[in-house]
Image: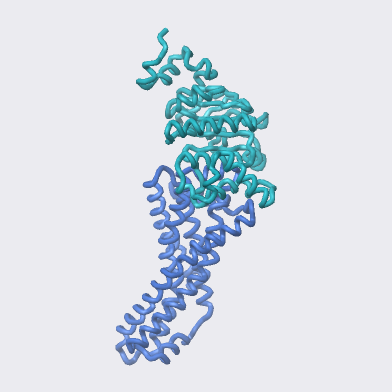
């Protein structure tokens, strides 16, 4: 479980996050949704430690990430997997080397065990034929899969996904969503997903947090998402013509 | 103000860079890869430039040595001094600042804008140490070697030009090369080259590491890397020369 308590963050005097309080639960897909510029990427970067919050606390299973020293942070980081919007695979390494990388750096496995683990992760995400390919030689969807394989190689307790299906066709996007859902449930991971994709939200949002102008504006589940009575969230959900047409009339 | 801010940032980056690597075996592999990329891949271009510059220096010096009062050995002597003191350590380093500096800055800059550096940081890998230290070590190990090769090739080029076009006899040229030879000059040249390698790799890595935006910005940081590392190199050349030889 991850708890965010009274987190604020400003850049050049402009407050981007305003007193954020959230709880992300284990074994569930916790979604952060919101318009571009609402502060959700900043929130995600604060969670993983790429940005330091101005104040407030971020607790990983009651361990305060914001006040701990570098070594303790390093320990937590080995429990974190992250899927970036652009995959962020190391482009000079093959898929296999990318997945092996965290194992070589942090695990105490011998080489054979590392190779076995990497093979398992690559096969788990359905990339058995792409072991020796460079990221530039595979499709965007395959890159996302490879990035998921790298993210889960160390058996993370926490998985962060920044717009996991952006840039993918709808069908591949759905496959990636399903893969993340399966992995979350299989390993009881606390998964935090930053997304715009309405299909992901409606299908996979165990817990949905709507961020609006730096505030947590609405929280709920996929079951009460479409029928909510929050005007800003309604505007956000039904922003496209096709969704406006199917909007239930009250 | 901006200079002091950036210089402070550069020093802080160096502080993060000079830490114990996380995995020594992996680090050693990276150093070997960088030795190949930074050093061995530069050898051919340095050799080509050096052989031609050596030959041209001899032709130009020979052209100005029509006066019979100037001793015949001056040609070899002049070439040796120019090559050892300035051409091989400084001009070759400037050439390498262009070749290696832009490559380092664009490589690290691309990793920054494609979030590969963020990925390293989130994993708990010290990205500065992981990406920059192998390049600095590879530079420190290979630059003295490249500069030494450049000295030898330049002198060989000069010798060939002198003998081939009858600018000097082989004996006069070789006696010029041996005339009043101070071995410390080689030490001075290698010291300079070693320091320049540190400047080129670290300044270029700094500009790549703090690149932001997209492809255009990576291009800009790559240009800045070459410009600033060249300026730093020329400035330190003056200071080192004044301290050691002045």
* Quadrant location of the N terminus of chain A in the rendered image: top right
x and y, in percent, of residue B146 in the image: 49, 70
Colour of chain B, in one word, is blue
The residue at the point 40 percent across, 80 percent down is B157
Q: Number of callouts in the render?
A: 0
Residue placed furthest toward the front: A129
Query: From what the image shows, is residue B206 above or below residue A145?
Result: below
- Which one is nearer the viewer's eye here, A172 or B62? A172
x and y, in percent, of residue A225 in the image: 50, 17
The residue at the point 60 percent across, 56 percent down is B27
Query: From what the image shows, is residue B142 above or below residue A63?
Result: below
x and y, in percent, of residue A35 in the image: 43, 26
Colour of chain A, in one word, is cyan
Whether residue B34 sits left or right of residue B227 in the image: it is: right
- Which one is nearer the viewer's eye here, A82 or A54? A82
The residue at the point 60 percent across, 24 percent down is A23
Colour theme: by chain
- Which one is nearer the viewer's eye here, A212 or A85? A85
Query: From what the image shows, is residue B125 above or below residue B232?
Result: above
* Quadrant location of the C terminus of chain A in the rendered image: top left
Query: From what the image shows, is residue B183 above or below residue A237?
Result: below
Residue A58, can we see it?
no
Residue B175, can we see it?
yes
x and y, in percent, of residue A91 in the image: 49, 49
């Amino acid at each position: 479980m991850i708890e965010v308590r009274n987190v604020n963050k400003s850049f050049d005097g402009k407050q981007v996050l305003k007193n954020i309080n959230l709880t992300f639960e284990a074994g569930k897909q916790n979604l952060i949704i919101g318009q571009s510029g609402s502060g959700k990427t900043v929130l995600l970067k604060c969670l993983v430690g790429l940005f330091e919050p101005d104040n407030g606390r971020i607790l990983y299973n009651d361990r305060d990430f914001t006040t701990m020293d570098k070594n303790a942070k390093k320990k937590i980081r080995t429990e974190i997997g992250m899927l970036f919007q652009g995959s962020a695979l190391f482009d000079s390494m093959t898929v296999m080397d990318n997945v092996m990388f965290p194992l070589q750096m942090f695990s105490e496995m011998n080489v054979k065990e590392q190779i076995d683990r990497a093979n398992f992760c690559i096969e788990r995400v359905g990339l058995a034929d792409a072991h020796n390919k460079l990221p530039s030689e595979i499709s965007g969807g395959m890159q996302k899969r490879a990035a998921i394989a790298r993210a889960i190689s160390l058996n993370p307790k926490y998985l962060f996904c920044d717009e996991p299906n952006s840039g993918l066709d709808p069908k591949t996007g759905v496959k990636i969503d399903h893969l993340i859902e399966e992995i979350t449930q299989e390993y009881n991971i606390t998964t935090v997903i930053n997304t715009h994709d309405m299909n992901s939200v409606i299908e996979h949002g165990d817990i949905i947090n709507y961020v609006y102008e730096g505030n947590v504006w609405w929280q709920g589940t996929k079951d009460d998402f479409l029928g909510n009575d929050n005007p800003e969230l309604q505007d956000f959900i039904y922003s496209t013509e096709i969704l406006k047409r199917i909007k239930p009339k009250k | 103000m901006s200079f002091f801010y950036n210089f402070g940032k550069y020093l802080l980056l160096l502080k993060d860079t000079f830490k114990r690597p996380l995995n020594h075996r992996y680090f050693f592999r990276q150093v070997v890869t960088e030795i190949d990329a930074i050093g061995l891949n530069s050898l051919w271009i340095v050799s080509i430039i050096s052989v031609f510059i050596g030959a041209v220096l001899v032709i130009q010096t020979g052209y100005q040595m029509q006066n019979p009062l100037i001793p015949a050995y001056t040609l070899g002597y002049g070439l040796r001094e120019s090559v050892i003191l300035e051409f091989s350590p400084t001009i070759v380093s400037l050439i390498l600042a262009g070749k290696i500096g832009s490559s380092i800055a664009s490589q690290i800059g691309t990793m920054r804008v494609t979030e590969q550096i963020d990925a390293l940081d989130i994993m708990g890998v010290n990205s500065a140490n992981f990406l920059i230290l192998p390049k600095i070590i590879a530079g420190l190990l290979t630059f003295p070697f490249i500069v030494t090769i450049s000295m030898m090739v330049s002198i060989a080029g000069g010798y060939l030009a002198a003998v081939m076009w009858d600018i000097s006899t082989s004996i006069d040229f070789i006696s010029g090369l041996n005339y009043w030879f101070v071995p410390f000059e080689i030490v001075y040249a290698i010291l300079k080259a070693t320091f320049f390698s540190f400047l080129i790799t670290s300044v270029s890595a700094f500009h790549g590491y703090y690149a932001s935006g997209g492809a255009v910005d990576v291009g800009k940081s790559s240009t800045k890397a070459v410009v600033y590392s060249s300026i730093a190199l020329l400035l330190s050349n003056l200071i080192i020369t004044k301290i050691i030889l002045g």
